[in-house]
Every structure is written in C-alpha cells, then in structure tokens.
Image (cartoon, rainbow, N blue to C red):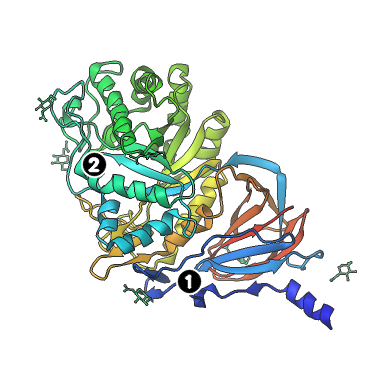
Amino acid sequence: MRETALFILLAGIITTARADSKDGCLALNFGHGSVVCVCNATYCDSLGRTVLPDAGQFLSYVSNKAGSRLMESQGQFQKNSTGAALRITLNPSQKFQHIKGFGGAMTDAAAINILSLSSGAQDQLLRQYFSTDGIEYRFVRVPVASCDFSTRLYTYADTPEDYDLQNFTLAKEDVHMKIPLLQRAQALSAQPLYLFASAWSAPAWLKTNGALIGKGSLKGKPGGKEHKTWAQYYIRFLEEYRKYNLSFWGLTSGNEPTAGEMTNYSFQALGFTPETQRDWIALDLGPALHSSSFSKTQLMILDDNRLMLPHWAKVVLSDIKAARYVHGIGVHWYFDRLVPPDVTLTSTHHLYPDYFLFATEACAGWSPVDRGVRLGSWDRAEDYAHDIIQDLNNYVTGWTDWNLALNQDGGPNWVKNFVDSPIIVDPSKDIFYKQPTFYSMAHFSKFLWEESQRVGVSFSQQTSLEMSAFIRPDASAVLIILNRSEEEVPFEVWDQTVGFLPGSAPPHSILTLLWNRQ
Ligand SMILES: *[C@@H]1O[C@H](CO)[C@@H](O)[C@H](O)[C@H]1NC(C)=O
Ligand SMILES: *[C@@H]1O[C@H](CO)[C@@H](O)[C@H](O)[C@H]1NC(C)=O
Ligand SMILES: *[C@@H]1O[C@H](CO)[C@@H](O)[C@H](O)[C@H]1NC(C)=O
Ligand SMILES: *[C@@H]1O[C@H](CO)[C@@H](O)[C@H](O)[C@H]1NC(C)=O
Ligand SMILES: *[C@@H]1O[C@H](CO)[C@@H](O)[C@H](O)[C@H]1NC(C)=O
Ligand SMILES: CC(=O)N[C@H]1CO[C@H](CO)[C@@H](O)[C@@H]1O
C-alpha cells in the first residue's frame, strides 16, 4: 500500500499553486490575450529565492496565456521512460557559448517613470528586476546623454568648439534620476551589476549636419580632432559616473550607426559606416580607452540590427588595428525576421569566435502596425521568448531589453516614438503592471546565471517546440521550452545521469525546468 502511494507521488508532478498563494499574481485582464500582474508599494507577486531541488527531483516553472506566472511545481525523475512520443535528450558533452546575463535599459524615460511612483513602490519595482526575490537582472544599458526616450535634446558638451571638453557636465537626468536609481539597483543586487554605455548622438558642433537628429556623422576624418574629442567624451562619461561609484562593464561604439548614416532620422543619431567605425576605433576610441584607466571596459561594435552581420563584423574585425580593441558585437532585434539567425549570428561566431555576441536592445510595440503599449499581450511575451531562444541557439551570450519602465502611453518620448515595456507604471494609482514580457525575461534571467554554458539537445521526433538547454556553474541543468501553439502534448526529457523527466508543454506557454545532476 505504502509503496503504491509513494509511486503515485513520485510519478506525478506535485503542484504548489503559487498563483493562489500569498505571493501570487494579482491578475488584471485588459482584453489583449492574457493578464498583467498588479503591484503596489506593499504587494507584488514574486518567486523568491529559487533553491536547487534534491538529487532525483526537478523544479518546473510555467507561465502561459491562460494566466500562470512562473507557477512552480516539483517532480521526480523516473528510471523508466514515460512512453511519451517526444523524447528530448540532453547532450552535455556538446558544449557551446557561456552566458553573460540579461537586463534592461535605464533611459531617462525609465527613470522618470520609476520616480513617478511613491518611494515604496519604486523600491518594489527595483526589487522586481534586481534582487534575488525578483528576476535578478545583471545588465543595465545606460544611454550616454539624451535619446528619443528623453523629454529634451541634450548632450554633455553642448558648448560649441569645446574640443577639450572643459564644459563637459552630466545632465540633471543623470545626477538626480539615473544615477540614484542605479545606485539603489546595485544595492538591491546580490552581485555587481554590469553597466554598459551607448551614445545616440555627438554634440551638434562635432557633426556634419550641425544637429543631434537627422542624417549626419562626425566632421573630418578618423584621427582628426572631432573624432578624438568624441572618443574622449566617452572617457569623460566613464570618469563622471565613477565619481558616483558606478563603474561600467562595457560600452558600445554608438547606438544604431546605420540610422544616422542612411536615413534622415527623426531623433538623435550619429552615422558611421563599418569602415568609418573601424577607423575611429583603431585611431581614436581604442587608443583613448587603452591609455585610460578604463582599458578593461568591454567594447562592443555595431549596437544595431543583426541583419548587418556578418558584413559589419568582417569590415571591423578583419582589421587588426581596430580588432585588438574590440571585445564583442552588440545586436538589436528589429527586422530579425528578414534574415535567418544562422546567416547573421552563427556565421559571425564562426568567423570571429573570440568576439562575443550580445543582444543590446529589443522592445515590443515598435512596429507601425502594432504600436505602443498593449497591456496583457501574450503574443509579445512569445515574441520575446522566441527571439531570446533563437539568439541563444546562435551563440548570443546575453539579451538586453529596452526601457525598464514606461507609462501607459509607452513614453515619455520626445518624438512620440512610443513602444511597450515589461513594466508599465500608473502613478495616479501608485501601482505598476508587470506585463507578460516581464515573465518572458524571468524565465531566462532568473535561471541562467553568468557562466552557464549552453549544451546540446536532440529529439526523438520532429517538434515545433523551441528550446535551449544549459549547464550552470553548480552543475545543475536548465531547459527552457517555448510552445507557441494551441495544443498540449506530453514529452519526456532524458538526462543520462538522472533518468527520465516527465513533462508537458501547455498551449502558449514558456517553461523553465531545473534539476540537479549530481
Ligand atoms: C497593495 O495591494 C494589496 C493587495 O491588493 C492591498 O491589500 C494593499 O492595501 C495595497 N496597498 C496600498 C498601499 O494600496
Ligand atoms: C521499468 O522497466 C522494467 C523493464 O522494462 C520493468 O521490469 C519495470 O517493471 C519497470 N518499472 C516500473 C516502475 O514501471
Ligand atoms: C565653460 O567653461 C569655462 C571654463 O571652465 C567657463 O569660463 C565658461 O563659462 C563655460 N561655458 C559655458 C557655456 O558653460
Ligand atoms: C563606493 O563603494 C565603495 C566600495 O564598494 C564604498 O566603500 C564607498 O563607500 C562607496 N562610496 C560612495 C560615495 O558611495
Ligand atoms: C529631415 O527630416 C526633417 C523632419 O524630421 C525635415 O524637416 C527635413 O527637411 C528632412 N531633411 C531631408 C534632407 O529630407
Ligand atoms: C508551435 C509549437 O511549439 N507547438 C507545440 C506545442 O507543444 C505541443 C506539445 O508538445 C506540440 O504538440 C506542439 O506542436
């Protein structure tokens, strides 16, 4: 009797209904496919600290269109196959890239929105992203001066002809908003945050078009005084932030250089071709960083749509004088559908395996046909998970979301380039909404620690499930599965060291499975 009961217990998946527990999602449905979770100064759903299950057990976390949010269950590995038609075999001997981490951007807009809440709600929001109770972001992209998600146009050196940057000063947006929030985020994080800087435009007086917006590049040629000043501007930025105890892990060579090069952009941009970026790095930025106290700062080129690869990387990295200063390649997700990821990402990895690939910007609600905030959209959660899995399966080492928080219009944005964000604030009620995309990020950011290594998976039959598998530094395994269809069919995972994991991917779901292999 006892053995039968035990067997039933072990074979089944024991569900702890987190949605109904005290830390569950307070769901609100705005009619866009799924729900948002409402948080205020004193209440927010959270997973808390995840603890590795005992040997032979696994943990499963599911979020789905039906409204589950990181719902935790525990189950037991079995010695025998479950008989499921789909067997997913973990192949740990097939090793790929190591993970750096996940995060979002502290834009002026994000800072304005976070600070529009009461201090209690601000703390709650920051904890959601950065603490071990939350989703444990490691990376924060920090715009260098203004971008479209600002309420005004400025740089830190708007005094004309100030080639020595004597009047370089951080803006009030840095000193009173972004810096204090970054310090608070750092204090909430169990680990040092990895900040990286991206500039949208150089000061107008350094540029061919004399404006921060539109089509324009630096005056003169790489090696010339404008290019030298623009390199020093980055150094000055790093110095100023260091005075506030904020040190940067990395920087990019500038946001979306193709925007300022090829189009009459409606907001801040600075054009580079791959050739001018190469020469500016070789002659100006690289030497400036190298001779500064920031020589270890990770320099990422491109910081633009991945469809520019591998061409952009070939031009910059085949030049030894530029390549020696570069560490990685930053990619954005816009237009990802136009070119397959193996053509852009994997081919670049194989050409330049010593340079890491890193996703530096993505957001939902940017397309003219599907614009702005959509509270509770599950499609957008799937878009995130699909793109992250695709990137990870093509050698990308981390993924950075765009604005950490926006208002209900998807701003503020001085050119009304409104988009969506995983957190939408409503200061009139002193609450914020965690969108389905917040949970997409969570399924990766909370579980894939730094130095987790992607490993192989194989299938017993054709499947349209999308997935990516990892071994973490503590030797535990993480498997993340996305099911974008309406159906549910059981599967099993076979891990030679522990046995068979009985599983099932619900319709329209994101699933993270975690187990101990020792
Ligand atoms: C926050 O939300 C919880 C749960 O709905 C509620 O009990 C509490 O009163 C709210 N707190 C404030 C300050 O509104
Ligand atoms: C496992 O499989 C073996 C061999 O097929 C069988 O003898 C045994 O009864 C099975 N055990 C369970 C618990 O089903
Ligand atoms: C720039 O700095 C110089 C010297 O520090 C100072 O005299 C001047 O007033 C500043 N100009 C502006 C526009 O801030
Ligand atoms: C800066 O950080 C160091 C070490 O983390 C700490 O000792 C120091 O007090 C901090 N300084 C400020 C101004 O926050
Ligand atoms: C560029 O766009 C601005 C408006 O954003 C417009 O005023 C200007 O005429 C445009 N320039 C060209 C060359 O098309
Ligand atoms: C699109 C997709 O991934 N669909 C799959 C969802 O999961 C079920 C169960 O494994 C499969 O049958 C679907 O093909």
Q: Kindly state the secondary structure of the residue where label 1 is placed.
A: loop
**Which residue in the rendered view is the most extreme toward the bottom?**
1
Q: Against 493, is 257 above or below? A: above
Q: Residue at x 42, y 24 (%)?
A: 295
Spatial separation of the CA atoms under disc 1 and disc 2: 38 Å
Name which quarter of the figure residue 239 lies in: top left
Q: Where does residue 351 sit, x and y in percent of width and height?
A: 55, 29
In the rendered structure, find residue 425 and report the number of the disc placed on it: none
Q: Residues within 10 Å of mark 2 (few under 14, many from 20)?
A: many
* Percent coordinates x, y for residue 253 in the rendering: 36, 31
Nearer to us: label 1 or label 2: 1
Disc 1 target residue: 23
Kindly identify which residue carries mark 2.
Answer: 146
Q: Is residue 265 left or right of residue 246?
A: left
Q: Please determine whether, in this image, residue 220 is positioned above or below residue 339.
A: above
Dot 1 amino acid type: Asp
Work out whether residue 34 or residue 484 is closer to the camera in this orientation and state it. Answer: 34
Q: Nearer the viewer, residue 290 or 215?
A: 290
